[in-house]
Amino acid sequence: MSSLSRRSRTFATMVAHRADLQPAQVQVLFSLYRATECRVAALADQQLVDPSVASRQITALVKDGLLARRPDPADGRAALVSLTDAGLAKVKQVRALHVQAVAESLRDWPVERMDRLAADLEELVGAAEQAYERFTGAEPAMELVKELV
């Protein structure tokens, strides 16, 4: 599992660079893709960074035309950020690069083996969610959704 995790981070970095992004920028784009729109502070919490770090990342992505920032109507001191059409296109590009690499890696696998892997991974994720819920007392996926909405 550790080897898979390390390689996954390496592959994610390679794909980010191929898309002319930094890995942290890809994380921001995908977080906003999932959340649609959120406050900078919630995004910083989700990324596990200081709000000033998130703000600098967002400023660079706004400058590149990948994100839009607007005042939060509920609190004018806060800002809401969301993907632009160019940002959505970049998310789709990064996703397509990952899909292409995975498809190529599974090219010679029989369908039954891919089905077995998918079922095993689904079971592993479910078991991990239950274990983390028992460990923390909260559902990780729902906790994240609440932070970003």
Image (cartoon, rainbow, N blue to C red):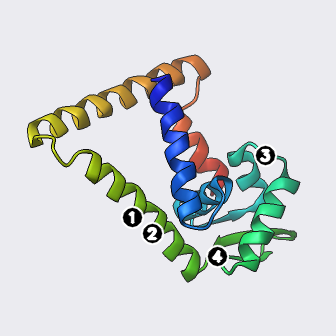
Q: In the depicted view, which residue is nearer to us: 104 or 129? A: 104
Give the Cα distance between marks 4 and 3.
Answer: 20 Å
Q: Nearer the viewer, mark 4 or mark 1?
A: 1
Type of the residue with mark 3:
Val
Ranked by sequence position, the earlier of labels 1 and 3 is: 3
Whether label 2 touches label 1, CB < 8 Å: yes
Image height of 134 relative to 22, above or below: above
- Tell me which amino acid carries mark 1: Ala
Residue 124 x/y as whole percent: 35, 26
Above-or-below relation of 121 to 1:
below
Q: Which residue is mark 3?
A: 49
Name the residue located 25 percent from the left edge and 37 percent from the top edge: 118
Q: Secondary structure at mark 4?
A: loop
Look at the numbered discs 2 and 4 and tell me whether their residues touch, using CB distance below 8 Å.
no
> What mark, if any, has residue 66 been given in the picture?
4
The residue indicated by pointer 1 is 96
Residue 121 left/right relative to 109: right
Q: Is any part of residue 69 visible from this angle? A: no
Q: Quadrant of residue 41?
A: bottom right
